Image (cartoon, coloured by chain):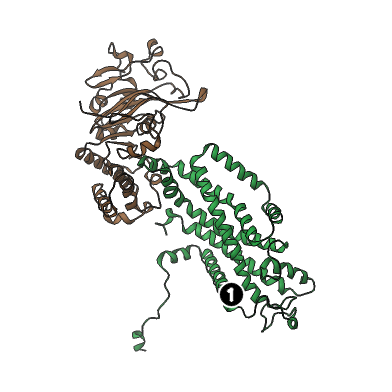
């Protein structure tokens, strides 16, 4: 056809240059980000897209297998599993994000200061953190949560404080690596005050590791918080929280109602996978020394 | 004589304590005059970098005095030194690790202005552009990050930062040894231009004698934390008085390939900096060593106009190694 050439070319969605290069370099990470974005969207839009009220019991529709009406089936109370899984995303984020934020808020300054100052400050804080790490985190968290009371706020506090040493160690080791070069000495020679060395010269250079780690630790926080709920600590059924749902579903596994526990389980695996893949991708993307190569 | 900008008097620097202490600098006296380039040469471990850092009070010496522009800054706390850092700056050997990789070149050059001047945002911007031009950096490079520049360009950024506050003293710690040979000449030319235009004094630390001949007015030769010889570059290069300087210079190939290099081969070991040396530090390797060298610390003796060397054999003129 001669006039075919005059037709405008279809508009294609073009990613910005660097994003595209990164997508090509690490497709897995890009998939992780996409999946994470989908979950975030799901959490935000949950009230709009849920077909049923996640806590509305329906005695007429108890333990129904997945069907057109109930995509993921219904549980022992006749609640729609699909709606509950979607709403559970909100809980997963609501616990993991503040927990990781708290861990960063506590861990990063500690890592910066101990790495920069060294000496006894470093010794004391790092030995304290080492002592914390000796205990298996689940046992420690369980002990604290059961002692302090199993509220959502307590779970967030425990997860955040328990995870702070991870960020402190990470930042401290990056600061030590930067100190071994001339970055700090050059900043001192230029006349930088200490706060500026910490916040302008050291902190931004540890950011990449921190962000990547944040995604990975968020995945840990999601899994641990669902573990708490699974063990009956913190959030209690019938609240639509994945861990609580999996616990409830476990009881029906043997009698064949697999959908109650399996669907929230899959959601949990996917979210934690998405966070891990995002973390790996971020570590790669945010390395300033690689920018010219990208 | 011109004004003295920086002065080291009886400077001592030990790292560690007791038997494990490393004696990096041993009673060093040194003057840096206004507008001169003083070359500090020595092998690795001779204490030349430590000396540069003591001069800028990046290190606190364990003994002796450091003075800048007449102020005794030996015991100044860092808080007080911070304001003084506008008057002294440093260029590091490895510009890749010295410059913050997250800052743009513009921000890096503006940093000393931000820290030490009252200039507003717009004025800083103009001044940074002027400085970039001064060190022959293209304006387009101001908006890049260090990762996007070459080693030579990064070293120009470091020099722009070092001259930004118009200091009276710049210490350059092997500024060209991490660069390609082709880039080196450009940096040395730039330093030469700056010396001609301003009254800034430079202390140029290097192990490369050929570089010193190009840039330095005066040379101080360091060995195991002591100044063994000091004097005008020409004099020290052409008529080295100390046997160590003679050996050091003979290790360099002559410019004319037909000329047979007269190499002085040194026997013996360099003493460990952990040892406490009595007498001359070069006694273990010196071909001219005699009994007296092992007894007292050799005083700096005159070896020509403005030239001194710490060798007892200067007294009777038997300090030349026969090649």
Q: Residue furthest right?
A: A255
**What is the display colour for chain A?**
green
Q: In which quadrant of the rendered view does residue B78 lie?
A: top left
Under tag 1, what secondary structure?
helix
Give the vertical position of B95 relative to A82 (above or below): above
Residue at image point 67% right, 54% down: A141
Q: Is B185 left, or right, of A266 in this rendering?
A: left
Q: Position of residue B51 (x, y in %)?
A: 37, 30
Query: Foreground: B265 or A148?
Result: A148
Residue B264 in view (yes/no): no
According to the image, label 1 marks what residue? A46
Give the vertical position of A158 relative to B116 (above or below): below
Q: Position of residue A106 (x, y in %)?
A: 55, 51
Give the vertical position of A37 relative to A174 (above or below): below
Residue B116 in view (yes/no): yes
Q: Position of residue A221 (x, y in %)?
A: 62, 59
**Quadrant in which the C terminus of chain B is drawn:** top left
Query: Foreground: B57 or A209?
Result: B57
Task: Give the letter of the chain under mark 1.
Answer: A
Give the vertical position of B251 relative to A22 (above or below): above
Q: Position of residue A61 (x, y in %)?
A: 73, 82
Label 1, residues with CA under 10 Å away: few <14, some 14-19, many ≥20? many
Q: Is B97 left, or right, of B167 in this rendering?
A: right
Residue at image point 28% right, 57% down: B140
Q: Is A89 left, or right, of B222 in this rendering?
A: right
Q: In which quadrant of the rendered view does residue A40 lie?
A: bottom right
Q: In which quadrant of the rendered view does residue A79 lie?
A: bottom right
The chain coloured brown is B
Query: Foreground: A35 or A108?
Result: A108
Residue at image point 46% right, 19% down: B276
């Amino acid at each position: 056809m001669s006039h075919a050439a005059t037709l405008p070319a279809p508009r294609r969605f073009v990613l910005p240059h660097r994003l595209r290069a990164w997508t090509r370099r690490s497709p897995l990470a890009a998939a992780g980000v996409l999946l994470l974005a989908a979950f975030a969207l799901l959490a935000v839009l949950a009230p709009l897209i849920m077909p049923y009220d996640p806590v509305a019991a329906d005695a007429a529709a108890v333990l129904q297998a997945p069907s057109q009406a109930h995509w993921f089936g219904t549980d022992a109370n006749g609640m729609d599993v699909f709606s509950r899984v979607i709403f559970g995303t909100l809980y997963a984020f609501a616990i993991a994000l503040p927990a990781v934020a708290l861990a960063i808020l506590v861990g990063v300054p500690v890592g910066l200061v101990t790495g920069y100052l060294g000496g006894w400050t470093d010794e004391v804080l790092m030995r304290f953190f080492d002592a914390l790490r000796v205990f298996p985190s689940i046992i420690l968290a369980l002990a604290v949560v059961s002692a302090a009371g199993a509220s959502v706020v307590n779970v967030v506090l425990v997860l955040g404080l328990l995870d702070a040493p991870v960020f402190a160690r990470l930042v401290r080791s990056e600061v030590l690596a930067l100190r071994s070069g001339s970055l700090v000495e050059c900043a001192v020679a230029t006349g930088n005050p200490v706060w500026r060395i910490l916040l302008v010269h050291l902190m931004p250079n540890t950011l990449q590791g921190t962000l990547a780690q944040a995604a990975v630790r968020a995945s840990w926080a999601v899994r641990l918080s669902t573990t708490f709920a699974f063990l009956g600590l913190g959030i209690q059924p019938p609240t639509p929280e994945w861990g609580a749902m999996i616990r409830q579903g476990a009881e029906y596994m043997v009698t064949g109602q697999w959908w109650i526990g399996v669907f929230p389980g899959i959601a949990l695996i996917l979210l934690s996978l998405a966070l891990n893949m995002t973390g790996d991708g971020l570590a790669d993307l945010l390395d300033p020394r690689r920018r010219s190569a990208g | 004589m011109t004004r003295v900008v920086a002065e080291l008097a009886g400077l001592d620097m030990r790292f560690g304590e007791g038997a494990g202490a490393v004696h990096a600098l041993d009673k060093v006296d040194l003057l840096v005059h206004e507008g001169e380039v003083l070359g500090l040469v020595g092998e690795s471990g001779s204490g030349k970098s430590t000396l540069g850092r003591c001069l800028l009070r990046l290190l606190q010496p364990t003994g002796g005095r450091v003075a800048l522009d007449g102020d005794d800054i030996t015991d100044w706390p860092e808080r007080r030194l911070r304001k003084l850092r506008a008057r002294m700056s440093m260029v590091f050997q490895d510009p890749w690790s010295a410059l913050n990789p997250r800052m743009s070149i513009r921000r890096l050059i503006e940093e000393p202005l931000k820290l030490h001047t009252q200039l507003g945002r717009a004025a800083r911007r103009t001044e940074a552009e002027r400085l970039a031009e001064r060190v022959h950096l293209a304006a387009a490079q101001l908006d890049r990050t260090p990762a996007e520049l070459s080693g030579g360009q990064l070293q120009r950024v470091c020099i722009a930062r070092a001259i930004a506050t118009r200091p009276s003293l710049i210490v350059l710690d092997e500024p060209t040894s991490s660069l390609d040979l082709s880039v080196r000449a450009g940096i040395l030319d730039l330093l030469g231009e700056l010396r001609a235009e301003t009254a800034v004094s430079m202390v140029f630390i290097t192990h490369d004698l050929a570089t010193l001949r190009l840039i330095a007015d005066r040379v101080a030769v360091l060995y195991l934390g002591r100044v063994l010889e000091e004097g005008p570059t020409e004099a020290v290069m052409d008529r080295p008085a100390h046997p160590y300087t003679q050996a050091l210079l003979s290790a360099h190939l002559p410019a004319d390939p037909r000329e047979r290099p007269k190499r002085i081969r040194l026997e013996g070991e360099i003493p460990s900096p952990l040892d406490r040396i009595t007498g001359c530090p070069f006694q273990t390797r010196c071909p001219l060593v005699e009994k007296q060298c092992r007894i007292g610390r050799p005083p700096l003796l005159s070896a020509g106009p403005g030239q001194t060397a710490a060798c007892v054999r200067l007294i009777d003129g038997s300090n030349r190694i026969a090649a």
